[in-house]
Image (cartoon, rainbow, N blue to C red):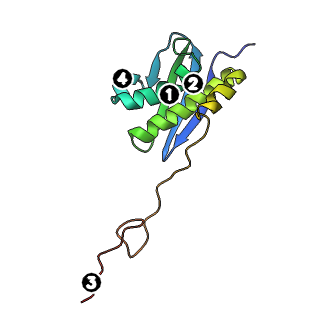
Amino acid sequence: MKQTRFYATGRRKTSIARVWLVPGTGKVDVNGRDLLGYFRRAVLQMNIEQPLKVTDSMDKVDIKATVKGGGLSGQAGAVRLGIARALTVMDETLRATLRQHDLMTRDPREKERKKYGQPGARKRFQYSKR
């Protein structure tokens, strides 16, 4: 039996995206809303569509994604990684193309923790000599 749904997980910062790919017409659905309704900024939309454009599968698959945690930028990055991983589950030959465009690497940058005696992770309170 040939598989018709392809699943992958993407992460970025504190966001986690679950992505399903189904052969279709290019419809992208994020948390029950279309891509333009959820990610309003054009930069985030381009970010998400990047793996599809690189592999020339823009109008060949429908995408359903659920994403939670973090902000919109982190969520867009998580969905992008999830789409790239799901495309490799669907077709292993796309892995080299996606890797070449640096779409298969998870961005390891996380928020640094706040330290005690400081207002933030690195910022210090103003020093008073007198």
Q: Which of 92 and 35 is in front in this view?
A: 92
Q: Indicate the amino acid at tag 1.
A: Ala
Circle 3 SS class:
loop
Circle on res. 36: 4
Query: Is 10 on the left or on the right of 46, as rendered?
Result: right
Residue behind mark 3: 128
Point out the tag, 2 or 3, that comes first from the N-terminus: 2
Label 1 close to label 3 by CB (< 8 Å): no
Q: Give me the C-alpha separation between circle 2 and circle 1.
A: 6 Å
Label 2 close to label 3 by CB (< 8 Å): no
Q: Indicate the amino acid at tag 4.
A: Leu
Point out the tag, 1 or 3, that comes first from the N-terminus: 1
- Where does residue 62 sit, x and y in percent of width and height? 52, 16
Query: Is 87 on the left or on the right of 65, as rendered?
Result: right
- Where does residue 64 sit, x and y in percent of width and height? 50, 23
Residue behind mark 2: 20
Point out the tag, 1 or 4, that comes first from the N-terminus: 4
Label 2 close to label 1 by CB (< 8 Å): yes
Residue behind mark 1: 65
Q: Give me the C-alpha separation between circle 2 and circle 3.
A: 56 Å
Q: Indicate the amino acid at tag 2.
A: Trp
Q: Check disc 2: other Cα within 10 Å, few if <14, some if 14-19, many if 20+.
A: many
**Residue at the bottom extreme of this rendering:** 130
Q: Which residue is drawn at 24% across and 90% down?
A: 130
Label 1 close to label 4 by CB (< 8 Å): no
Q: Looking at the image, is mark 2 or mark 3 nearer the viewer? A: 3
